[in-house]
Amino acid sequence: MSATFKLLACTAVVSLLSGCASLLSEDVQELQVTLLCKQRPVAVSCTASNDLGRWQFASPGKVLVLSDTSVLDITCRGHSTPRFTVSVPPLPSWSMAGNLLAGGLFGAALDAYSGVGMKYPENIDINNPACGE
């Protein structure tokens, strides 16, 4: 095998690995959100929002959101619970970390920019500030 062919083959493999999270990850993410009062789940109505949209759901429960690089704001309100908001930042996903390790610095940067490589935590437990724990 010639050195030129090996170089081209190696370049092709690295190019295919770049953007791995973009190719393998979905834009939609399912989150489990639970509002807790003294370590017990409380039923409330909530809205999750980021730069890509707004989603209403009941907590404890699941909500489908679009992954993004922006903070996810979760606002909850119940019969005996005053309205309050918490912010959940996105974190780099394992697919993005794998993309970086595989030599895809460009792909990892693309994943971070597009938001595909960023994910919110799958389980979000919110301690109710009005409970007075």
Image (cartoon, rainbow, N blue to C red):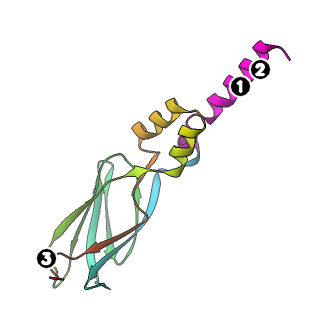
Of 4 and 18, the residue lying toward us = 4
For this view, does 12 lie left or right of residue 133? Answer: right
Q: Rounded to the nearest whole Å, what is the CA distance between mark 3 and mark 2? A: 65 Å
The image's mark for residue 64 is none
Q: Residue under circle 3?
A: 82
Q: The residue under label 2 is which amino acid type?
A: Lys
Q: The residue under label 1 is which amino acid type?
A: Cys
Query: Mark 3, residues whose alpha carbon is within 10 Å: few (<14), some, or many (≥20)?
Result: few
Q: Residue under circle 2?
A: 6
For this view, does 66 lie left or right of residue 18? Answer: left
Tag 1 near tag 2, CB within 8 Å: yes
Residues drawn in magenta: 1-23
Secondary structure under badge 1?
helix
Q: Quadrant of the N terminus?
A: top right
Of 30 and 118, the residue lying toward us = 118
Determine the residue positioned at 45% across, 34% down: 109
